[in-house]
Image (cartoon, grey):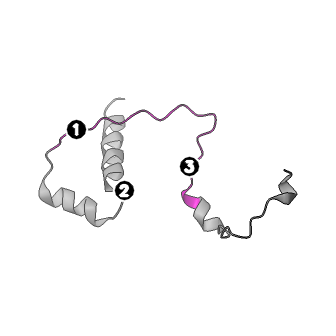
Amino acid sequence: MKDEEIDFSDLPEIPPEAFAHAIVRKGLQPVARKAQITLRVDADVLEWFREKGAGYQSRMNAVLRAYKQAHTR
């Protein structure tokens, strides 16, 4: 089948804004696996991160990574 023969009529158009959150990893090193742990965090700190919405655990990880990088130089 040639590209011209493909029927895209049932697919919604993707606005350019949707690509702003895309992640392209072609040619990059694989993402390191994350370890699942149990971590005690003050309730107010956890609530603050949760209030920021979905992805709060990733944001917590980013804060820890930034701290690590700032202290390993």
Q: Are marks 3 and 2 in contact (CB under 8 Å)?
A: no
- Position of 12 relative to 65 (above/below): below
Look at the image and say whether residue 24 sits in the magenta stretch: yes
Whole-angstrom CA distance, mark 3 to mark 2, is 15 Å
Q: Amino acid at mark 1?
A: Ile
Q: Which residue is mark 1?
A: 37
State the residue at coordinates (36%, 46%).
Answer: 62
| Circles 3 and 1: CB atoms closer than 8 Å | no
- Residue 10 vs residue 43: left or right? right
Q: Nearer the viewer, residue 1 or 18?
A: 1
Chain-order first, disc 3 or disc 2: 3
Q: Report how far apart the C-alphas of labels 3 and 1 lie in the structure.
A: 26 Å
Question: Which residue is tagged 2?
Answer: 55
Amino acid marked by disc 3: Ile
Q: Residue at x 32, y 64 (%)?
A: 52
Q: Which residues are magenta?
A: 20-39
Q: Is residue 39 left or right of residue 55?
A: left
Is residue 19 placed above or below 40 in the rendered structure?
Answer: below
Q: Quadrant of residue 18?
A: bottom right
Residue tagged by mark 3?
23
